[in-house]
Image: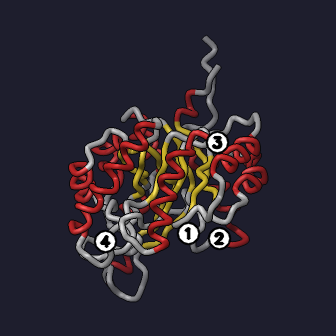
C-alpha cells in the first residue's frame, strides 16, 4: 500500500555547484530523507548534467527517495559573464531535469541591479516568457524562491519574487501555468508577514517548498527597530524557529498541495558547522512529526 503521508515528502538540499552531489547523496541517503534538491550557485561549472543526474539516481538506488526539483540560483536578467552562465545554467537544468527524475527547476528571477523592482519587469518578461515555453515543452515547471537576498522594493541584486505584491506583477507579465514559486515561511517572516494566510491565497502557485524557519526577536524590534545594528530576525532550521509547521503542513494539505519540502540548511546560527547535520536531521524528524508522524493503516 502506498503511504499517503508521503504526498508531502521531507528532504534536503544538496550542493552541486562544485560536483560531488552523488557522493553526498550516497553518504546521507540512509538518514531518513525522502527527497533531495541538488542545486547550483550561479553556474553549473561545465558539469555534464545528464551524467550527474544518472549518478545521483544511482546513488539513491532502490530507496524510496525522489528528486523533484533542481536549483539554479543566480541573476539571469543581467549580462555580466557570471549572469550569462546563470542563464545558460537555467537552460541546461530545464533540458536535463528528466535525467534526475525532476519536473521542476527553481531559483531566483534575477533583477536589474540597484533599480526599483518594477524596472526589472520588462527584462523579466523577455527572459522568462522564453524559458517558460522551453520548460513547458519538456514538461517542466519553473519555481521562484521568495528570498529577497538583502534587496527590497527600491533596490537589490538577485531577485524580485520576494513579496506578494511583486508576485501579482510577475504573474501578470508571465501568466504561464508552469511558472510559480519555491516558497518558504522564513523569507516572509523576515518581512514580518504572517505565512499562514499566504498559503491559503497562493498555494496553487507553490511548486516546491523549502524547509527553513525564522526566529523573530520582538524585543529587539521594540527597542531598536528593524534598521538598527542588532539583528531582529534569525534564520533557523525547522524545529528551532517560530513557525508552526503543523499548521503550515495542514494548510498545504487543505489546499490540496503535494510535493517536497526540502530543508535549506547552512543558515542556522546555532546548528551549523559541526552541528549542521544534527540540526538538519532534527528538522527532518520535526517536519515528519508535524506531518502527522508515522503513517498508520486503519485495520478495517
Q: CA distance from mark 2 to mark 1?
A: 7 Å
- Under circle 1, the secondary element is loop
Q: What residue is disc 1 on?
A: 267
Residue that carries the numbered disc 4 in the rendered image: 112
Give the answer, above or below, for where 109 lies relative to 102. below
- Alpha carbon of mark 4 to alpha carbon of mark 1: how far? 26 Å
Name the residue beneath numbered marker 3: 34
Which residue was labeled with disc 2?
272
Point out the residue furthest to the top here: 300
Place of residue 38 in the rendered image (x, y in percent of width and height, measured from the top left): 61, 53
The colour scheme of the drawn protein is: secondary structure
Q: Residues within 10 Å of mark 3 (few under 14, many from 20)?
A: many
Mark sitting on residue 107: none
Mark 2 is surrounded, within 10 Å at the Cα level, by few (under 14), some (14 to 19) or many (20 or more) other residues, namely some
Mark 2 residue element:
loop
Q: Is residue 239 visible?
A: no
Q: Residue at x 43, y 43 (%)?
A: 135
Q: Secondary structure at mark 3?
A: loop
The picture quadrant where one finds residue 67 is top right
**Residue located 47% across and 73% down the image:** 81
**Nearer to me, 175 or 135:** 135
Q: Residue at x 60, y 38 (%)?
A: 101
Please state which of residues 111 and 278 is positioned toward the viewer in this rendering.
Answer: 111
Q: Earlier in the sequence, mark 3 or mark 1?
A: 3
Label pair 2/1, CB-CB below 8 angstroms = yes
Amino acid at each position: 500500500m502506498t503511504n499517503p503521508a508521503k504526498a508531502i515528502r521531507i528532504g534536503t538540499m544538496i550542493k552541486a555547484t562544485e560536483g560531488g552531489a552523488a557522493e553526498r547523496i550516497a553518504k546521507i541517503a540512509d538518514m531518513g530523507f525522502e527527497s533531495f534538491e541538488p542545486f547550483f550557485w550561479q553556474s553549473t561549472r561545465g558539469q555534464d548534467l545528464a551524467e550527474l543526474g544518472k549518478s545521483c539516481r544511482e546513488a539513491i538506488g532502490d530507496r524510496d527517495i525522489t528528486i523533484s526539483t533542481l536549483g539554479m540560483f543566480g541573476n539571469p536578467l543581467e549580462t555580466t559573464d557570471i549572469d550569462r552562465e546563470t542563464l545558460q545554467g537555467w537552460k541546461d537544468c530545464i533540458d536535463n531535469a528528466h535525467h534526475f527524475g525532476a519536473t521542476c527547476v527553481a531559483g531566483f528571477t534575477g533583477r536589474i541591479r540597484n533599480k526599483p523592482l518594477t524596472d526589472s519587469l520588462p527584462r523579466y518578461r523577455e527572459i522568462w516568457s522564453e524559458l517558460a515555453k522551453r520548460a513547458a515543452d519538456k514538461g517542466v515547471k519553473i519555481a521562484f524562491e521568495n528570498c529577497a537576498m538583502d534587496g527590497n522594493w527600491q533596490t537589490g541584486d538577485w531577485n524580485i519574487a520576494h513579496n506578494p505584491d511583486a508576485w501579482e506583477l510577475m504573474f501578470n507579465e508571465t501568466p504561464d501555468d508552469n511558472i510559480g514559486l519555491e516558497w518558504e515561511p522564513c523569507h516572509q517572516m523576515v518581512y514580518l508577514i504572517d505565512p499562514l494566510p499566504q498559503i491559503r491565497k497562493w498555494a496553487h502557485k507553490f511548486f516546491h517548498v523549502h524547509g527553513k524557519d525564522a526566529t523573530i526577536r520582538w524585543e529587539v524590534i521594540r527597542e531598536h527597530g528593524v534598521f538598527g545594528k542588532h539583528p531582529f530576525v534569525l534564520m533557523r532550521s525547522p524545529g528551532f524557529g517560530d513557525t508552526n509547521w503543523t499548521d503550515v503542513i495542514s494548510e498545504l494539505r487543505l489546499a490540496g498541495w503535494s510535493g517536497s519540502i526540502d530543508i535549506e540548511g547552512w543558515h542556522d546560527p546555532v546548528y551549523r558547522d559541526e552541528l549542521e547535520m544534527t540540526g538538519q536531521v532534527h528538522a527532518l524528524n520535526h517536519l515528519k512529526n508535524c506531518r502527522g508522524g508515522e503513517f498508520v493503516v486503519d485495520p478495517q
